[in-house]
Image: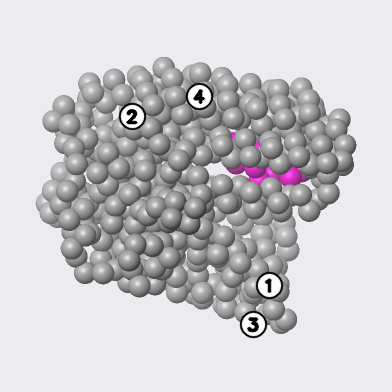
Amino acid sequence: MIAALLRAARPPSPLAGRLARQSLLFALGDGAFLAGSAVFFTVIVGLEPVEVGLGLTIAGIAAFVAALPMGKVVDRFGPRRMWAVSAVGQASMFALWPFIDDFTGYVVMAVAMEVVGVLGGAAHGAYTIDVLPPGERVRSRAYMYSALNAGFTIGAAVGALALAMPGDLLLQGLPWFTALAFLVNAAAITRLPDASHDSKTPEERKVKVPGPGPLRNPGWLATTFLVGVAWTNQVLLHMVIPLWVISETDAPRELVALLLGTNTVMCIVLPMAAARGVSDVPTALKAMRLSSAFFVLSCLITMATHSTVGWVTILLIWLGHVTLTGAELKLSAASWTFEAELMDPRQRGNYQGVAEFSGTFGRVWAPAVYTFLAITWSSYGWLVIAGIIVLATAALHPVALYARRWLEQHVPAEVLADARSSAPEAEEAIAVGPPSLIDTEVPVMDPRP
């Protein structure tokens, strides 16, 4: 049993292992701050709860607006460089948090962090697709997803410890812990091999890529919008089902913590199993159908708990959460494949920015709509929620296939063929190059002797 677990913990490749360690480091720092952020902003910064929410909304709007230009910056200057710049920028901003003491400073910091975070997100996505061999992309991204969830779990424990200690000294220093984690991560990013877009000369970066960009690719816009709709499963996981448990069932409120713990464990242990066999657009669409089926099953199970009592309610709520996590895992594998298969390889940063832009449209409405449907319409509301995902999944099939045809019509065949070929030089650089800072910092992610 232990040997099987150790085999499952092995990364698909040395490159995937290094990238996974950096996912863990990022999540360790970010998770620690997120766990204590609500108390930090109200106790240390001195904000009212409504001010915290307003600032986050303003920052979210800024991130939405910044998505397109940040994607272009990634393509212009290279994903690895911009990923490192983002990590250093976020580390610097986290280090400043303890000195912020009013609402204006909070909003300025929140906006700046979101914009720099968007740059990092676009750069990280473009880099991983660029540098990972096509045959390993989905498995490697799944391994990184496991590490990300493990990092958030450890980070949340650090944040909880800071909250539990008497006084506010540890809480006030929590952003510095996050800043240190981001700085170590930034240093490690600079030691990774260049992706193809990082190898451009200054003159090459000034040359506009021929052909239309992602905003003129209707298949990509529609695909990312519908994938955004599918990602509203997170709204059920983190908002609607907890509210349902508290207000519409006889289950104890402590069950919410168990549900979140179940989701976290499954997202650490199962991503690679869920991603197995997902390698191209047809298999990604099959994964989307399975994700949709899990989603619908979760809605039906949760809906039934409105009239159950006692342990039956608890068991059904837990089972509904498990099936919804299954929807998340299959959706993750499909979305990674769409990113790899439906982007113009020459404009991955730009495509990542547009994906964030259109994906936001696909999910931004869900908190208000899903909460209203589930809490106000009860059983009928859950059926409507399930129906939304079924329709989105059905619509995704023709638009994803159209997006692939559009790419084949507008991108030279040799460019697409080269993007689908392996990248042994990057793999070799990882295997024989100098050890990363992370190799000694987080050995738990690589159990090999």
Query: Mark 4 = which residue?
Result: 289
Q: CA distance from mark 4 to mark 2?
A: 14 Å
**Label pair 4/3, CB-CB below 8 angstroms:** no
Q: Residue at x 66, y 40 (%)?
A: 321
What's the magenta bit mostly, secondary-structure-wise? helix
Mark nearest the camera among 1 and 2 is 2
Residue labelled with disc 1: 163
Element on which disc 3 rests: helix
Residue at the spot of label 2: 280
Disc nearer the start of the sequence (1/2): 1
Image: 437 above or below 333? below
* Real-space Cα separation, disc 4 to disc 3, in angstroms: 49 Å
Asked whether the viewer can see residue 235, the reply is no
Marks 4 and 3, the one that precedes in the sequence: 3
- The correct choice, above or below, for 416 with respect to 94 in the image is above
71 to the left or right of 47: left
Q: CA distance from mark 4 to mark 1?
A: 42 Å
Q: Which residue is depicted at the point 69% across and 29% down?
A: 299
Residue 8: horizontal and vertical position, in percent? Answer: 42, 50
Magenta part of the chain = 232-243
Tell me the residue that label 3 is attached to.
169
- Mark with earlier residue (1, 3): 1
Earlier along the polypeptide chain: callout 3 or callout 2? 3
Q: Nearer the viewer, mark 4 or mark 3?
A: 4
The residue at 19%/53% (across/down) is: 426
